[in-house]
Image (tube, rainbow, N blue to C red):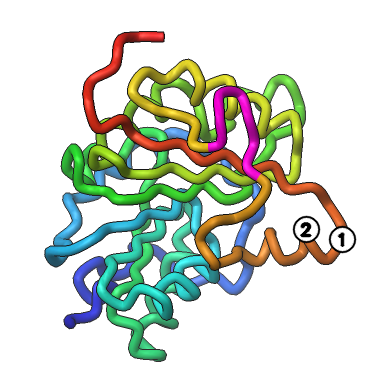
């Protein structure tokens, strides 16, 4: 299998050793990225939204070598590092893409193309004035539903209850998505056998992790 990272390429701009922890996705430069459609091979597609170092995806790659595992990341230095690691380690089915989650997904994927989306520990943006920067809103949830295949899944994880509760409200309001663990319920376990670095550190600190697992309906549903 050709390397996905070779097809995706590297984002423009100088290399930086320092990776910023917080990036405002509403800055003009991130609203004008316009990435091209991804040249994906046939087969299952899984996408991590905000992949950072993509530890989660590399673990999934060992378990599912026939699945295309794509990380969407707004910070170009992480994109470079992930793709360089995939190339150096010969992991053909992992690639990171420099894109803005809240606006570029329909340009990257076709409707019904994605088998699973993972949203692992998004930036909580604690200050009330920054809540508009939180990644998951109703518009994004509806986009994810359309990009998922019927029966496809969306996993959301956070160690911040306020953020997880807000995500639960959004997803429960999204027609065509069903809570696998029961209406208005969290899931006890991560069902995918892969962990991000943030999940590992949260578990080491004894923090509660709030998990949501939603599935796209296999038939049209009335609005809720």
Direction from residue 20 to residue 47 in the image, left or right: left
User: Which residue was labeled with disc 2?
Assistant: 202
Secondary structure category for the residue under label 2: helix
Label 1–label 2 contact, CB within 8 A? yes
Residue 84, given in percent of the width and then of the height, sits at 40, 81
Q: Which residue is painted at 63% across and 57% down in the image?
A: 20
Q: Which mark is residue 62?
A: none
How busy is the neighbourhood of tag 2: few (under 14 within 10 Å), some, or many (20 plus)?
Answer: some
Residue 149, given in percent of the width and then of the height, sits at 24, 42
Secondary structure category for the residue under label 1: loop
Query: Looking at the image, which is closer to me, 135 or 32?
Result: 135
Q: Which residue is painted at 68% across and 37% down in the image?
A: 124
Quadrant (top left/top right/bottom left/bottom right) for the C terminus:
top left
Farthest residue toward the right? Answer: 205
Residue 90, given in percent of the width and then of the height, sits at 34, 89
Direction from residue 143 to residue 131 in the image, left or right: right
Q: CA distance from mark 1 to mark 2?
A: 5 Å
- Quadrant in the rendering for residue 133: top right
User: Which residue was labeled with disc 1?
Assistant: 205
Q: Which residue is painted at 50% across and 58% down in the image?
A: 51
In the image, residue 75 above or below residue 171: below
Q: Which residue is painted at 31% across and 30% down in the image?
A: 217
Asked if residue 44 lies in the magenta stretch, the reply is: no
């Amino acid at each position: 299998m050709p390397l996905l990272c070779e097809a995706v390429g590297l984002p423009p701009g100088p290399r930086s050793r320092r990776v910023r922890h917080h990036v405002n996705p509403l800055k003009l430069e991130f609203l004008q990225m316009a990435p091209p459609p991804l040249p994906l091979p046939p087969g299952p597609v899984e996408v991590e939204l905000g992949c950072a170092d993509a530890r989660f995806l590399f673990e999934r790659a060992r378990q599912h070598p026939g699945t295309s595992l794509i990380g969407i990341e707004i910070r170009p230095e992480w994109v470079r590092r992930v793709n360089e690691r995939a190339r150096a380690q010969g992991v053909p089915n992992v690639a990171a893409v420099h894109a803005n989650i809240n606006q570029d997904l329909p340009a990257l994927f076709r409707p019904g193309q994605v088998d699973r989306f993972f949203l692992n520990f998004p930036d909580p943006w604690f200050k009330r004035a920054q809540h508009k920067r939180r990644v998951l809103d109703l518009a994004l949830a509806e986009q994810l539903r359309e990009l998922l295949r019927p029966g496809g899944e969306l996993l959301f994880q956070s160690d911040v209850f306020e953020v997880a509760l807000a995500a639960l409200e959004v997803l429960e309001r999204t027609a065509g998505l069903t809570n696998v663990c029961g209406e208005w319920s969290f899931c006890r376990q991560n069902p995918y056998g892969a962990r991000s670095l943030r999940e590992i550190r949260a578990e080491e600190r004894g923090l509660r992790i709030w998990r949501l697992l939603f599935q796209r309906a296999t038939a049209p549903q009335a609005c809720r």
